[in-house]
Amino acid sequence: MSFQVIHNDKNSKARVGLLNTKRGIIQTPVFMPVGTQATVKAITPYTLEEMGTEIILGNAYHLYLRPGTDLIKKAGGLHKFMNWQGPILTDSGGYQVFSLSILRKITDKGVTFQSHIDGSKHFIGPKECLEIQDILGSDICMVLDECSPYPCEYEDAKIAVERTLKWAEISRKVELNSGNKIFAIVQGSTFKDLRHDCAEKLVDMDFDGYAVGGVSVGEPPELIYEIVEYTLPLLPDNKPKYIMGMGTPEDILESVGHGADMFDCIIPTRYGRTAHAFTAKGKLNLRNAAYTDDLSPVDPECDCYLCKNFTRAYVRHLFYAKEMLGPQLLSQHNVHFYLNMIKQIRIAIKQDRFIQFKADFLKKYKN
Amino acid sequence: MSFQVIHNDKNSKARVGLLNTKRGIIQTPVFMPVGTQATVKAITPYTLEEMGTEIILGNAYHLYLRPGTDLIKKAGGLHKFMNWQGPILTDSGGYQVFSLSILRKITDKGVTFQSHIDGSKHFIGPKECLEIQDILGSDICMVLDECSPYPCEYEDAKIAVERTLKWAEISRKVELNSGNKIFAIVQGSTFKDLRHDCAEKLVDMDFDGYAVGGVSVGEPPELIYEIVEYTLPLLPDNKPKYIMGMGTPEDILESVGHGADMFDCIIPTRYGRTAHAFTAKGKLNLRNAAYTDDLSPVDPECDCYLCKNFTRAYVRHLFYAKEMLGPQLLSQHNVHFYLNMIKQIRIAIKQDRFIQFKADFLKKYKN
């Protein structure tokens, strides 16, 4: 069994599952720290493992351009290259091609684009995209999709969905190395009929899992939640459901309640690099003068290395002194916060008290 | 006994000693990683401890200006503030006042200067300087000195020595918290008679240890070695002898052979941040194209976390991708290299084979 729901919350659509990958079983809901360029920013694999990270995310677009698949293949795959033994999901790069590359040209065959690094010209189609991920040795490969921006005209979103579906069909026929999974991505911007159409047709193709793509691309939270709430039930309950690029603690709680199983987001590490700390009582900007001589832990309820050994005043000092240790420790803390939150979510679901947990968490978090 | 030489090498002036501090016994020769601003750059205290760091260096000038002694006092001292339990030696900031601050005015009473951070005006005299270090809770405090630049006119160097001696006299009378040691600093630029005069008078004042200051400030290596070789024998053998701000592996080997016991240097961390790796076979610039697909460890003979788990090609990728993990891992490796070198030096001295060790090390290191 590739994916198995082991408990459905009695009072919501939240669920706990087990996702079987070549490199181990992942408990869902799961949060995947983002390691775009073959490293979760500022955190060693050793520390990730110690914090209980179950799976990380890599990015096919970035890794294809730099350091390139030749080197990663020679190194024995992405896992060996970056020294991460656990499962890796790689994003197809669909989103990055649209957000980062220059002079792109999209046809039904794929995307021609210039590298954001050195301007070199490349073509990636749905087949090539999966081949790249297979060379990387990704445990879960994402199909190439066309990600619509927000806001987006209906006609443009429709074309993107049609192309996403065409590419998905081609992707379904690609033979990957044994045990590697393929997830498809539902697009359709904020248009329910497009989301519905896209989901239905992808489900017919029978992928190993399904993602909701094209959310968290600039829409207001209410609209994101509406799309998530609408789209998740369109996906089969016996497959993992993944909301791409999401989100804040609030986003994750909301989506879990609608039945989402997997999340990835740059927020914990990016915020960590800009002195923002997640705590049980909300987000802190540790650059604030209020923390100048605050000798309490960043989050008194947290048991990460930072919170057990250092103070807010110290972290603030590190950021003002431009010391790398600041971003290092805070990135680590924030990822720990996310991993711990998702662990607590799983426990709450198993005990049928997810709704209560969510309410309690948010009440405290929003002070 | 505060300091005890436990073995003198039969064929050189190299020696192994034990330096007793409030926070533990340090084996000498010792290398002190530099933690100027209450952190060894990019390395956690946990990792420092794991690597066998015996003592680190802090800087009174920097810490006085930011975050300030009030906060550090409130936090229970520098050790608690930065979560480093081992001994700390703090530099007086004499060198920094001259190299970093603006609009400084030196009189026999001390130095008036403006902060390099915010332009605020400050006065530090020899007494104030030790008081700052005492508040920090430094295990070894350095006296305030006037550090001559290189090159330097004889007359200027002479004035600096006279002032350094005057300040040392005042310093000797300052009562520090129980157990804290005071080391004096020999100045005199490249002039032997000034070095001699300064050393002799400082020795008469009976400090807990002696440093050779004003070296490694721009002179050619031969000249540094000449000063070191000339000055070290002027200092009492029953006191620790510390060469400030030194140096490369070659510098350290040379100075140990002349009887030096203590070293500090920013080189391992600074080089680590610029992709330079120390290895048994010499220094590598990991940005070089030669390492693009080099899947060997940074230093095959090293057993640090970086060398046991990652490749040169991976580290090169991290630097090109501007990933913080590159500087993190390489700073850690370089400090480990220094600590391991000094450990090997101690073993060699105890076995009366320091000269052979030095020759073997340098032959391999210089390829």
Image: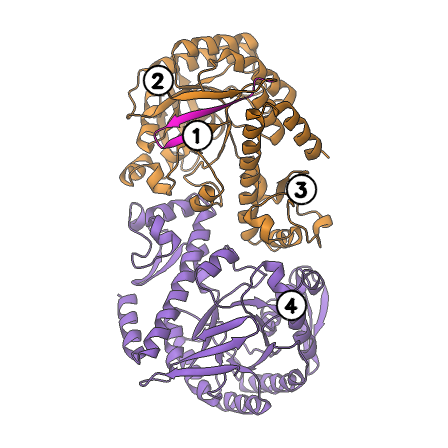
Chain colours: A orange, B purple
Q: Residue at x 47, y 75 (%)?
A: B262
Query: Cβ–Cβ below 8 Å for labels 4 and 2?
Result: no
Residue matched to label 1: A26
Discs 4/1, front: 1
Residue matched to label 2: A171
Between A174 and B87, the residue placed more toward the observer is B87
Q: Residue at x 70, y 53 (%)?
A: A292
How many angstroms separate mark 4 from mark 2 (CA)?
63 Å
Report whether residue B277 is seen: yes
Q: Quadrant of the C terminus of chain A?
A: top right
How many angstroms separate mark 3 from mark 2 (CA)?
43 Å
**Residue stretch rendered in magenta on the structure:** A12-25
Category of crowding for the residue at label 3, using alpha-carbon neighbours closer than 10 angstroms: few (below 14), some (14–19), many (at least 20): some
Query: Identity of the amino acid at label 1?
Result: Ile
> Quick check: do tags 2 and 1 share a chain?
yes
How many angstroms separate mark 4 from mark 1 (CA)?
47 Å
Discs 4/2, front: 4
Residue matched to label 3: A284
Residue A259 has which mark?
none
* B107 lies left or right of A43: right
Query: Identity of the amino acid at label 3?
Result: Leu
Category of crowding for the residue at label 1, using alpha-carbon neighbours closer than 10 angstroms: few (below 14), some (14–19), many (at least 20): some
Mark sitting earlier along the chain (1/3) = 1
Query: Cβ–Cβ below 8 Å for labels 4 and 1?
Result: no
Query: Identity of the amino acid at label 2?
Result: Ser
Mark 3 element type: strand
Between A132 and B290, the residue placed more toward the observer is A132
Between B93 and A183, the residue placed more toward the observer is A183
Residue matched to label 4: B136
Report whether residue A243 is seen: no
